[in-house]
Image (cartoon, rainbow, N blue to C red):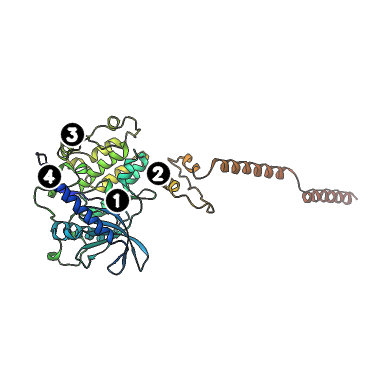
Amino acid sequence: MSPTHESAQSIEIDDEAEAEQPADVDQANEEAHQKALERARDLIGQTISERYRIIDLLAMGGMGAVYLGEHVLMHKRIAVKILHPESDDNPEIVARFEREALVGAHIDNPNIAHATDFGKLDDGSYFLILEYVEGKNLAEVIREGPMKPRTVVHVARQILLGLQAAHELGIVHRDLKPRNVMLESGFVAKLIDFGFAKVSVGKLPLTVPKEGRPPSRLTGVGVIFGTINYLAPEAAHGMDAVDERADLYALGVMMYEMLTGKHPFDSTDPVEMFSHHRTTPPPRFSVRAPDVTIPAELEPLVGRLLEKDPYERFQNAAAAIEALDALSISSEPVEEAAVRSRKITPPPPSVSTRPPEQSSANTEPAKVAEAAPASAVRKKKKKARADELARRAAEKKPSAINYTLAVIAIVAVAAAAFFASR
């Protein structure tokens, strides 16, 4: 989970602008938020369900709070999500919470944060125990500026591996965005927050009978939910029209942002933004980010992910992974990530670090040189030259033993010749 974790909201796309909220409503919302914040802070230090200790408050949202916790018996860090008590009266919010627990428990993939427990507190509030992912979310990294193309390919491939595992179980994320991608050290990507996921429960390895499984519909017909900045055009026909290709569209927007540092479209109005997704071709990289150098082969790949017609996109995550692997810049994504990781968390001085062996193709020796100081490299080369010179001198100079043996051999040959002549 992320300290800046946030959830999307259910919305309706309407041509009319929303009316401004009255001041008294804003005041009431602020008071409710402060009350919820105080209640959330009161849980710090407490142990819930007799085994999860709440250590710190990481984030607050409209539905609930996210905490850093610890399993008191296993001494393992965890993330704890707890719904606000008033959220329990909202069936849709509870259904989302249950859905996140269901998905997180059934997808076993290193690129998806998994769920380990789900239940209720004494006051009736629901809680969810999740894998704690330590690092930054992708939104924070994008705010730092454009990412290196090789790193973008590396991160995108991991996101696709997570999506592939979900899609094979009939699960569509439907709210894929940078805040829902956590990056651990070494740019290891993990998908989080499947609260809006579309779940085909028939594909999940559930033990409850079909009639007891949760329904797949979260909202009424015609309601669009998710995050507008990453919403696929086909969502205009309703969320039933959204399938795994909508997740690939969201990834295309994210790759565009990772490469250029900017979203394809400039708009703060949700209706206008969704209109761009439906009708406006994404600007070329050179137009959106003229000062950033991006390999030309990435543009058509991202462009295909951003096709308005889902049938013109990659039809599944496996096809997109194959296209990434075919890129000439995709040969060393993990190595670059490892170099970045060493800069963040260098090994202790007492531990020697041996650089990785270079492959025969598409290698860049300059990256290996970063693992050791230049002075150390020079000393190592000088010592190697001295050892080589000493070896050659030893080969040219006969030893004392060799000299003695040679003299004895000459004397023996002379004696043999003398006695043979007599």
> Crowding at label 1, few (<14), some or many (≥20) Cα neighbours within 10 Å?
many
The residue to which callout 1 is attached is 161
The residue to which callout 3 is attached is 280
Q: Position of residue 30 (x, y in %)?
A: 20, 50
The residue to which callout 4 is attached is 22
Q: How much space separates mark 2 and mark 4, taking CA atoms?
A: 55 Å
Q: How much space separates mark 3 and mark 1, taking CA atoms?
A: 29 Å
Q: How much space separates mark 2 and mark 1, taking CA atoms?
A: 17 Å
How many numbered circles does the render carry? 4
The residue to which callout 2 is attached is 332
Task: Answer with mark 1 or mark 4, whichever residue precedes in sequence.
Answer: 4
Amino acid carrying label 1: it is Leu
Q: Do the residues labelled 3 and 1 touch (CB within 8 Å)?
A: no
Q: In which quarter of the image is residue 131?
A: bottom left
**Helix, strand or loop at disc 3?**
loop
Q: How much space separates mark 1 and mark 4, taking CA atoms?
A: 46 Å
Task: Answer with mark 3 or mark 1, whichever residue precedes in sequence.
Answer: 1
> Crowding at label 4, few (<14), some or many (≥20) Cα neighbours within 10 Å?
few
Q: Are marks 2 and 4 in contact (CB under 8 Å)?
A: no
The mark closer to the camera, 3 or 2, is 3
Q: Where is residue 25 in the image (x, y as percent from the top left)?
A: 14, 48
* Residue 159 vs residue 227, the one in the foreground: 227
Which residue: 13% across, 60% down? 89
Task: Answer with mark 4 or mark 3, whichever residue precedes in sequence.
Answer: 4
Amino acid carrying label 3: it is Thr
